[in-house]
Image: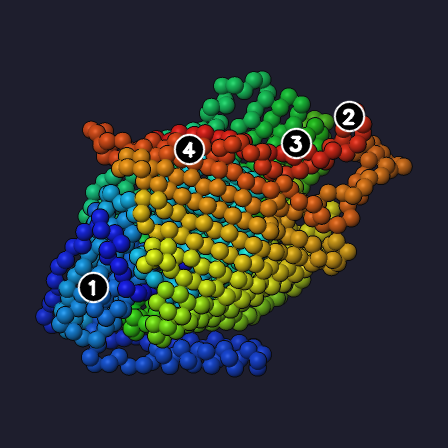
Amino acid sequence: MGVWGYGRKKPYHTPILPYSHTEWKPEPNVELHKLMHASVNPAGPMSPTTVRPAFFLVALIIFWMGQPVHAQKSTLSGTLTDEQSGEVLIGANVLAVTMDKGTASNTYGFYSLTLPTTDSLTVLFSYIGYHPQLKKIYLTDDIVLDVQLEPARSVLGEVTVEAERANADNVRRTQMGVFDVSIRAIERLPAILGEQDVLKVIQLLPGVQTGEEGTTGFHVRGGNVDQNLIQLDEATIYNPSHLFGLFSTFNTRALNNVQLIKGGFPAYYGGRLSSALLITMREGNRRQYEAQGGLGIISSQFTVEGPLKKDKASFILSGRRSYIDLVLRPFQKGKDKNLYYFYDINAKINYKLSSRDRVYFSLFTGRDDAAYVDASSISYGTRFGNETATLRWNHLFGNKLFSNTSLIRNKYFIRVNTIQGQFFSQNYSGIEDLTAKTEVQYYPNPAHHIRLGAILTRHVFSSTGSEGYIPEGGVTSLNPTTIPDRASMEYAFYVNDRWEISDRFGINVGLRVPYFSERDTTYLRVEPRLSVKVGLDDASSVKASYTVMNQFVHLVPTSNASVPTDIWAPSSRITKPQYARQVALGYFRNFKDNQYEGSVELYYKEMENQVRFQEGTKLLAYDEIEQVLTFGRGWSYGAEVFLKRNYGRLAGWLSYTLAWTNQRFAALNNGEKFPFKYDRRHNLALVLTYDMNPRWLLSGNFVFRSGSAYTLPVGRLYASQGGALYNGLFFDYVSVNNYRLAVHHRIDVAATYHLKPNRYFKESNLVFSIYNVYSRLNPYFVFLDLDTATGEPVATQVTLLPIVPSVTFNFKF
């Protein structure tokens, strides 16, 4: 799937969407704006073998940027928005039909199209789920044209996963390994307990492995969960989960766009090895006040939005809370207490200062709070959450030069306290980032999109922890050992150019230079990025990519999966930055006049400086964490198949991944290679939606995947002394991840019934869904226990989710 793309749009694919046709003439004396040219100078101690190609690459890009604009060309630019709400449309298509040249709007709805001057230009503006507009434009001078597209209420040809529209863009564009997932697609699919979830849909894409059964964790092309860059309005989310991974922290009612990049990374994303999940919040309705909500089995949410100043400023406020604790509280007896709740709040305001300037401010906070107390003096409590704040300024220097400057703060923390009898333990871990970034985007012509920018981030790592015996008289508070905060700085400079040289050949070339410092240690890296496309014909192409990535922060998971005490730690003199090098090759083809699109991608990825705790490590805080870590390498390779049906009452996609992922650590498994925990040979997902009629929508998915690897002992022995522990029995672990869980498969279904508008609700629907229809007991984990009759060890499987029906009522007024 792709971010950019141009090619001839086929209006007859959606005959139910009539075109709006208007003429547009430029106003007299339109001001001509000077173009601003940018350059980079990535200085630093680099090896000669790296310096030559790196500086040649930069020199080539500067040469492209410096090419003069011919006098006989003019630029059409502007912003694409929703006619009713004023929300910007991300990735909307702009096609000069008469010239077969086009572009797509960026993250802020801005587009720029430079074409030969003409007095007869036909331009098509289109976006999925909206009525296209066809405009005749007299392009005799530079024109600023803002276009508002009207939402289509009855769309039977909905695209389930949207990347580009009814054209051959997935064949013609250069970038590979990119998926744009529409919020409408997420809302149409089955959900667990009525909670629509971004991350659950991401897990159904090729190359993405799920974590534990029913959870939102995901692993991309053999990478760990910390190797996914997850951003909400440019702010990093370090833990995107509620309910210990059952739901994500993202409330779909507050979101505008979701994009996953898993290969062929452009230079403006970095700091992680495996993927970038980029989520954009909605801006709020700029024309009228609206409210909407949903009542589910486990939680409810409510969203209100409207103009602060009509067509100039707007706001959106969205909140969600579970009520498990409220339901269980009346049933708690005596000293027993088992309570849990989560909530999240999204807020955003935007103000249009002028035709060239716009300011955004967004906030997000999410919390999970769990407590368990019983009469046997066992007490357990955990609290974790995310906070983000983003202030952004968009400025339009001219019709070809756009800039974005952001100040960002994000924080993640987790606190776990346990008391059992006279013994207590507690720990706290957190990471806080302060980021400043600026970027310019330059559109010299439809074939070029150049982005150049710089990012500065200050990480602060916090940790406390202690354990011991509680005095007989008890204590009123537990005093942990405080470890001094550790601060580090991370810088990055990048330049990226997408250049469609011809209809048959295109490249996406970039260079990223990150620099990291922590205490007395510094690291400078050079990350070249290259994607190449060769068109075989109008319906097929071959693409290849090469990517180098570095990661300077590490999530070191503990061996206890039931308590989320994972610790984030910086790179240091001992803990080297993680490093990955990935190559990919793909074949892309469209069928039946773009009604179907398919692709096959092959990839190979090497990962160095992977981090794990040494066997038997017990850690409460990160003080001197390097002393208990072990380091190794990993490698992953496989093939991904994707087939999507774009149009018709029946739509959906099929994804299949064949993959291998292995690791090798000198201090583990006798130095021999072993499979990564989430190495799954086969992953299959089939997703379908069917518009039965204007009232009923049916949807479903089937998932099959091989079992993940886990470790079981091969023998046991009895201790001759000190046998009171574990009843004197010890298991003999010889190799790592030497067994496999059972295969996972299930079917989920949903039916959505749209109710008629009434005096109370402008729109409303009932969603009936069933997760795991045939109640397959898929494994969550396996543990060893002793059979009381024979004394023999028995492996016991724990299942998290059997069949789960749910009903949700959604409304808007």
Residue type indicated by callout 2: Thr
Q: Distance between the residues labelled 3 and 4?
A: 40 Å
Q: Name the residue under label 3.
A: 419
Q: Earlier in the sequence, mark 2 or mark 4?
A: 4
Q: Disc number at residue 660? A: none
Q: Name the residue under label 4.
A: 769
Give the residue at x 28% y 66%: 102
Q: How far apart are marks 2 and 1 (CA)?
A: 77 Å
Q: Nearer the viewer, mark 3 or mark 1?
A: 1
Q: In the image shown, does 71 or 323 lie closer to the viewer?
A: 71
Q: How far apart are marks 2 and 4 (CA)?
A: 41 Å
Q: Where is residue 58 in the image (x, y as percent from the top left)?
A: 44, 78
Q: Is residue 91 visible?
A: no
Mark 3, Cα crowd under 10 Å, few <14 / some 14-19 / many 20+, is some
Give the residue at x 64% y 52%: 676
* Tag 2 and tag 4, C-beta contact below 8 Å: no
* Tag 3 and tag 4, C-beta contact below 8 Å: no
Q: Name the residue under label 2.
A: 788
Judge whether 376 appears above or below 182 on screen: above
Q: Position of residue 578 (x, y in %)?
A: 60, 61
Q: Name the residue under label 1.
A: 123
Mark 4, Cα crowd under 10 Å, few <14 / some 14-19 / many 20+, is many
Residue type indicated by callout 3: Ile
* Tag 2 and tag 1, C-beta contact below 8 Å: no
Give the residue at x 21% y 42%: 288
